[in-house]
Image (cartoon, helix red, strand yellow):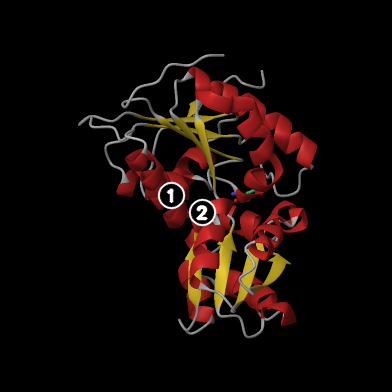
Amino acid sequence: MQIIYNLESPIGIFDSGIGGLTVAHAISQLLPQESIVYFGDTAHLPYGDKSEASIQAYSIKIADVLLKKGCKVIVIACNSASSAAYELLKEYVRKDAKIINVIDPMVQLVTSQFAGKKIGLIGTKRTIQSGVYTKKIKDANKNISLSALPTPLLVPMIEEGFFNNKISHEILEKYLTDSSLKTIDALILGCTHYPLIKNEISSFYSHNITLLDSSEVVAQALKDYLTSNGLLSNTTSPIHQFLVSDYTDSFEASTRIFFRKEVHLQKHPLWN
Ligand code: DGL
């Protein structure tokens, strides 16, 4: 499929559901002139417990949708999909669009700023079991010790709106007091849902730890790519479109939390 795009072509962003809207929000703040097509695969949420093969199959179909929309870049706004499907998607999409994942920009930041330090990583089972962060950070040879802990209860907890309350405090305390995360210098929030509990995590550490939030890091990586390749849009009227593979009113209501304002979700018939 040979796709022709131009400066005004949209940025494609996808996630297993609406958590990736934290990345879409960061992108819309940093690059307000860019149009966005967001795809949330709500029919298959959560990806964190799915097999690598399933996530790869979903990701290819979603990439097709975003390519047909003429996207100049596709951002995988999900750590689970980035760890399972990035290499395959890059091969599949080739020259039709640039693919940016959420892991590489974070690895670049960590390896350039935290040499010799102990870093913690929390994420879904899929992300942690993939070992992708561990391998990439080790390959950079910066004497960084990475302690990775799966924290599978956090996504459903956030999806249910449980944060800044007693239950979320207890779940977070259980995870963050794990011995593997003792004496870390910084913590990678390795899931695009986690920016919503960033303040709560920061309070747990009495605000004495650096929290590395991939939504901001990825938005900056996208800006750097568009700038250095002369691909920045200069339209004054960007269009944002939000597609989901399964629609419910509660998904739409939750966009207010993840995107900081409620947006209209359109059901896309990808799996019908
Ligand atoms: N937002 C996804 C991630 O960054 C997690 C949600 C899910 O498990 O689908 O890994």
Q: Is residue 25 left or right of residue 252?
A: left
Q: Amino acid at mark 2?
A: Pro
- Residue 69: horizontal and vertical position, in percent? 46, 20
Are there few (<14), some (14-19), or many (20+) residues within 10 Å of tag 1? some
User: Residue at image x 57%, y 59%?
Assistant: 107
Decide if residue 160 is in sight here.
no
Quadrant of the rendered image containing residue 60: top right
Residue sitting nearer the eye, 142 or 2: 142
- Residue 84: horizontal and vertical position, in percent? 71, 43
- Residue 218: horizontal and vertical position, in percent? 46, 51
User: Residue at image x 65%, y 30%?
Assistant: 91
Dot 1: what SS? helix
Q: How many marks on residues? A: 2
Q: Amino acid at mark 1?
A: Ala
Quadrant assignment for the N terminus: top right
- Mark 2 vs mark 1: which is more N-terminal? 2
Q: Is residue 270 left or right of residue 39?
A: right
In the picture as drawn, the residue positioned furthest to the left comes out as 236
Dot 2 corresponds to which residue? 105
Q: Is residue 184 above or below residue 17?
A: below
Dot 1 corresponds to which residue? 221
Q: Is residue 195 left or right of residue 50?
A: left
How much space separates mark 2 and mark 1, taking CA atoms?
6 Å
Are there few (<14), some (14-19), or many (20+) residues within 10 Å of tag 2? some
Residue sitting nearer the eye, 25 or 272: 25
Quadrant of the rendered image containing residue 35: top left
Dot 2: what SS? helix
Q: Is residue 39 above or below residue 29?
A: above
User: Residue at image x 62%, y 21%?
Assistant: 270
